[in-house]
Amino acid sequence: MKPRRWLVYGVTGLALLALIAWTMRERISLEIASRVASARLNIDGVSELPDGLHVRVCGAGSPFPDERRLGPCTVVVAGTRLMVFDAGTGVRNLTRMGISPGRVDAILLTHFHSDHIDGLGELLLQRWVSGGPAQPVPLHGPPGVEQVAAGLMQAYQHDRGYRIAHHGESVLPPHGFGADVRPFALGETGRTVIINEGELEVVAFAVDHSPVHPSVGYRIRYKGRTMVLSGDTKLSAAVQREAKGVDLLVHEALSPRLVGLLTDAAKASGKGRMAKLFTDIVDYHATPEEAADTAREAGVRYLLLNHIVPALPPLPGLEEAFLGDAPRRFSGTLRLARDGDALSLPAGSTAIQTRHRF
Ligand SMILES: [Zn+2]
Ligand SMILES: [Zn+2]
């Protein structure tokens, strides 16, 4: 048989296969959707972890819409305890990361800017409907957290009623909904221990996000592994002090150069109000270079930048432009966080493993 005839047979075969796949596309998609749903329900991204300190980035972004970074949300697993730090829109990534909201043992807020709490009501609701413990989840935060929680509880009151009426109290115990609110004061030292349970210690400390008072960062220690979350702050001596010698520093970062482009664009479009807002936000955040300086001076091993401002569309070289001089100022591992990032600090080790998983 001539090669040309084989070519005709091959092309015809492929066309037939494509036609069959197209005809059956609905069945194929339903089968895939069914498998994905099953996998989502059965994946447990927590109990498979080795003993240690683990970080899951559920939201690496800020108020700026960024397709790879939802609003601030960081999961920290310490042994069997699962804590969520800040509850921005990134809380919607929990199930994508194989983490059931029903597994959340505690929520800790850094401050009450809207991007840090606009997923909180949803997280409380999802924890309840996902079969979490029948008690409300402990919600830690600086003074003011009571108002935030009370307002959300009021806003979700109708929804709570609908769901209990629809599914029944045996499925959704009414007293399981909501938060066990635990405000903390920082005192004169500017720091306080929030959780102290055997091998796990969580400390809150004041940072500088003026005029936002109070605004805190957190230091977490578990079985000799340590990390600091800066929260929202400009260059802060407190972050540097608390981060002294820790394994991992998760620090916010804003690029004045890239925000400057937005300011210029707003001015050119006659949007003076937006230009003023863009100009103002620069003074209460830290630059990537300042985060790098903090990490270097504190002697940390790994710097993860989060709360990325502004949004970074996936353009070649844009992340490098964002980082600026930071890679030259910090010689440890430096990473720009994206939703889905997974860092593991196993107990009894000095290793820090990084993966990206969704
Ligand atoms: Zn923020
Ligand atoms: Zn803020």
Image (tube, rainbow, N blue to C red):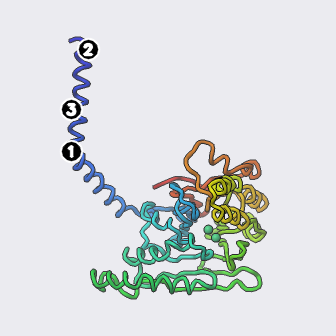
Labels 1 and 2 touching (C-beta < 8 A): no
Q: Percent position (x, y) of residue 270?
A: 64, 58
Q: CA distance from mark 1 to mark 2?
A: 30 Å
Q: Quadrant of residue 111?
A: bottom right
Looking at the rendered structure, the secondary structure element under dot 2 is helix
* Cα–Cα gap, marks 3 and 2: 18 Å
Q: Amino acid at mark 1?
A: Met
Mark before the other along the chain sequence, 3 or 1: 3
Q: Is residue 307 above or below residue 319?
A: below
Amino acid bearing label 2: Arg
Name the outermost residue toward the top: 2
Mark number, residue 24? 1
Q: Residue at x 41, y 74 (%)?
A: 126
User: Which residue is situated farthest in the front direction here?
Assistant: 270
Say which label, 1 or 2, has the lower sequence index: 2
Residue at left offset 67%, top offset 75%: 216
